[in-house]
Structures are given as C-alpha cells and as structure tokens.
Amino acid sequence: MASPGELDRAVADCRACPRLVAWREEAARVKRRAFRDWEYWARPVPGFGPADAPLVIVGLAPAAHGGNRTGRAFTGDPSGDAMYAALYEIGLASRPTAIHRDDGLELYGVRITMPVHCAPPDNRPTTEERDTCRPWLARELDLLRPTLRAIVVLGAFAWQALLPVLASAGWQVPRPRPVFGHAAEVVLPDPAGGSPLHLVGSYHPSQRNMSTRTLTPAMLRDALRRGADLAGLPTRLRHDGPDS
C-alpha cells in the first residue's frame, strides 16, 4: 500500500480474526432498536483523517453499534460524541458531531486510528487479536511518518499496543517502557535523524470515564491541545463551557 487511502481499503476487507468477524456481523444482524433502519458497515473500520497529519490519535477499537454501524472511527457512540466535540472546540474538526462516514466531517491535521479495527465483544479484544491487527497500525504509522510529530494515546490498552509498534519502527522507546497515565508525556528520538516523536497519554473518552468524571471534557481538550501543540498545529478554544 503506497498511501493511507489504499491501506484503508485493504483494512476494510480484512477477515483475519474469526471471533471478531462473527461478532461484527452478528451485531449488524441483531441491531439495536434505535438503529433498526440502518445498514451497518459491519467491516473493519479504517483510520480517518488526512494522509499528511502531524498528529495521530490512537484509540482502542470500534464500538459494535458505533463505528461498526457507521463505518468511521469514533462515530455514532458516546465516546465519539466526546471526542469530536473536543476536537471541534480546539479547532481541529469542522463540526462537533459525527453521524456517518459520509456526513462531511473534516479533521484538520489530525488522523484517528486504532490498534484493533473490528468491534470486539464487550470492547475487549484478545491479545492474539491485537497482535494479528498490529501490522495494519505499523503500516499506517509508517505511511504517516514523514509528517508525524505527536500521538495522543487514549487509554492503557492503546498505549501498550502502540509502544512495540514504535520500537519495531526504529523509534527509541525508553527502557523500562514508560507507564501509561493521563497527561503522561514521552519523547521518542529517531535514530535516523528525523524529528522526535511525542506521545501524550489521555484516559479514553468512554461513556463510563466521562460519566464518572474520571475524564472531563476539559481534561480531554487539554490532552488533545497538548498533542496539537507538540505536533505544531494551531488550536483555539471556541467557547468556555461548564467543564472548562
């Protein structure tokens, strides 16, 4: 694959994990009542965003009735509601809501991807499924490498999945490996002389984390803004909300 677009098309055709294939297709057959009129995507969900993005956001996996339904990462579920609202607030998305892959939403300098591209049962992919999906993430980051400057990593699962990919790609990952935490930051030098890569940790904007205020909208905006600053992207705060 010579471009992220070609990679996205290849990702969407993957059937490598039998349990995930069965689950994503079952979720599309036994729809939630609110979505009974939808034709589900029911395939692996590719990355989303420009091919020359200096900032990448790495999540976990699509939701069974979110990305698996809509065909786009973080679209159609509470996590996506929080994510795109935050990106819009800091000026990195064209609109605050994400409804469907064809709704016209644009990201500015940001690409969203994940270590597992199929919706897993209970939002819990196995270690084997994570490792089977790893080459897709590795290839995507390799294609983005000329412009990539920073990654915001959403949650411990994504952090643990990402570090081996970066180490295999030649980035200098510290030993012992850095521990995930909200607002954690790590700089990975490029031994080949390229720009260093900055990692920023953030709690995942899951419905549970947001409802318990483990992660607030302001915390999420701050993590995304920090990643954007490290990537050299301009940001702005559109308005001060109650959680600012």
Image (cartoon, grey):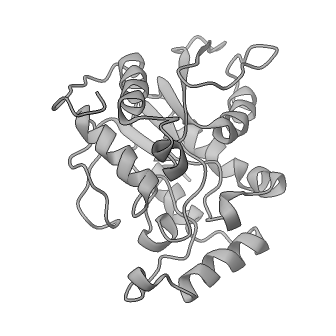
Front-lying residue, 167 or 75 = 75
Q: Position of residue 234 (x, y in %)?
A: 25, 22
Residue 50 visible in image: no
Residue drawn at 27 percent across, 36 percent down: 92
In the picture, measured across the screen, residue 162 lies left or right of residue 47, that is right
Tell me the quadrant of the picture where the C terminus can be found. top left
Residue at 26 percent across and 31 percent down: it is 90
User: Which residue is depicted at the point 54% across and 63% down?
Assistant: 63
Quick check: can you spot residue 157? Answer: yes
Q: Residue at x 53, y 20 (%)?
A: 183
Q: Is residue 166 above or below residue 130?
A: above
Q: Is residue 59 above or below residue 201?
A: below
- Residue at far front of view: 212
* Residue 137 percent coordinates (x, y): 62, 46
Viewer-closest of 177 and 132: 177
Q: Is residue 46 left or right of residue 18?
A: left
Image position of 226 (left or right of 135): left
Identity of the residue furthest to the left in this view: 239
Q: Quadrant of residue 224?
A: top left
Which quarter of the figure has residue 177?
Answer: top right
Residue 125 image-quadrant placement: bottom right
